[in-house]
Amino acid sequence: MDSIYNSIIEALIFASDDSLNNSEIIKAIKGIDGKDVQISPADVDKCIDELNTTYEKLNMSFNILRIAEGYLFATKQEYAKYVGFLSSEKSKRRLSQAALETLAITAYKQPITKPEIESIRGVNSDYILNTLLEKNLITITGRTESVGRPLLYGTTPEFLKYFGLNSIKDLPKPREIEEIMNDEDFLEQKRKIMMNMIEENIQEETSNEANNDIDKT
Amino acid sequence: MYKIKLDQFEGPLDLLLFFIKRDELNIYDIPISRITKEFLEYVNLIKLLDLELAGDFILMASTLMHIKVRMLLPKEIDEKGQEIDPRTELVQALLEYKKYKEVAEELTFFESNQRKLSFRGNFTADEKESLPEYETLLRNVSIFDLAKAFKNALARIKEKTVHEIKKINVTVDEQMKFIMDSLSQKNEMDFIGLVSVLKEKIRIVITFIALLELTKMGQIGIKESSNFNDFVLYKLNHG
């Protein structure tokens, strides 16, 4: 494949706010250059790897991620504090334990009805489901044929984006969990996350204090 | 008795798992009577605070007690002649819940990582939603959104109010006779008592007019009642 396509694909992904998938990229290229252009999803995928290697070499602050079966530019973790300072996303709150539990159940067992979710959690989940629907992390995918025709819930592409997953298949396998939980690496990572949370809290507090100071003057 | 922070638990299963973990119990061999006792202590505490949440806990408490009773009874045997452990269902539920609880923890890790990345377009993310572009309007719309919108639209249509008027044949003369008949039995009568047998508003109105008419004619008199908001009619006997 012509290396010019690397740049074209880069431009397409760069210009897109949302995760751009293979078929859209190929459609755009064939739409302009004609149907005879030989380009397959595998070519696009290889191209992404090449682009990322280039960024790595040049020590760029961003790379292309595979999210929701598409591609998306994202800044690297190192710059999170600075970007977050200006970005509206920084105010985003973390999901609650209840929300994460409900999401996990929905993600693995989708399509799933509310009573099924509630029977696993052992608690009423009305409120949580509504919150997740509002956040567009889950959606109604249909109805069952069983008595009362209850609604079925499933996850959205937004869910994949939120957790940085390429597809539902990339969710951690429940069976492996036990091992993961006892894994040294995971414990180390978990410790790091805890540290990050503490750091963020301190940051928030200090910035709040700073704001208060401004208010006083 | 030590205290447990209440909002730490997402539900009864979570609380049970907490007991199991804290006391390093074998999940396949739960000491039901001990756990039931602890669970009930917690339920009594939570009942004081949050009745709605307590419902789920009370349900679990009764399940636990049911299991406890079944444990005391002679062992039940299934078709294959094997003993049924009354705890099996609970253990299954606990394991199932535990599985997802752990996945949720794992997801927290993903969430945490992902929060550190920023995608393009984030700085304008807030305003973007207010731009009603034709194509973005149709994105993420499912049949259920349409159905919901349709339902909302229907709900917004104001119901046409139709006033149906039922003609009630009642005349002042009739009601004058009604008053006089009522008064012939007893000499005094309060107004509220008089109209209490009447069902329609219009009849009461007409009766009131009849009453005024009779007063004008000097057939009856009206005087104050001891009851506030009421008055008394009495028959005038002349000639």
Image (cartoon, coloured by chain):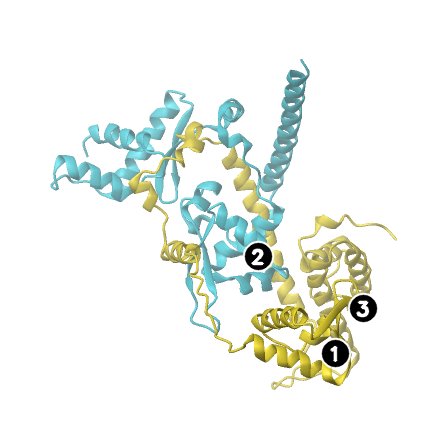
* Chain letter, cyan: A
Residue drawn at point x = 36 percent, y = 39 percent = A19
**Vertical position of residue B89 compared to residue B82: above or below:** above
Q: Earlier in the sequence, mark 3 or mark 1?
A: 3
Find disc 2 in the rendering and name its residue.
A126
Query: Which residue: 57% across, 74% down?
Result: B172
Q: Are there few (<14), some (14-19), or many (20+) residues within 10 Å of tag 1?
A: few
Q: Is residue B203 above or below residue A114?
A: below
Q: Are marks 2 and 1 on the same chain?
A: no
Q: Which residue is mark 3?
A: B33
Q: What mark, if any, has residue B238 been given in the picture?
A: 1
- Choose top left, top right, bottom left or bottom right for residue A55: top left
Q: Along the horizontal axis of the image, is A70 left or right of A140?
A: left
Residue B121 is left or right of residue A87, and the answer is: left
The image shows residue B147, relative to residue B189, as above or below, that is above
Residue B143 picture quarter: bottom left
Query: What percent of the width, then of the height, locates residue A212?
Result: 67, 20
In the picture, which chain is yellow? B
Residue B83 visible in the snapshot: no
Q: CA distance from mark 3 to mark 2?
A: 32 Å
Q: Amino acid at mark 1?
A: His
Mark 1, secondary structure of its residue = loop
Instruction: Answer few, some or many: residues within 10 Å of disc 3's Cα (few below 14, many 20 plus, some between 14 and 19).
Output: some
* Amino acid type for the residue under numbered disc 3: Ser
- B23 and A126: which is toward the camera: A126
Amino acid on which disc 2 is placed: Asp
Q: Position of residue A153 (x, y in %)?
A: 46, 58
Locate the C terminus of chain B and report the quarter of the image it occupies.
bottom right
Local secondary structure at mark 2: helix
x and y, in percent, of residue A178 in the image: 60, 53
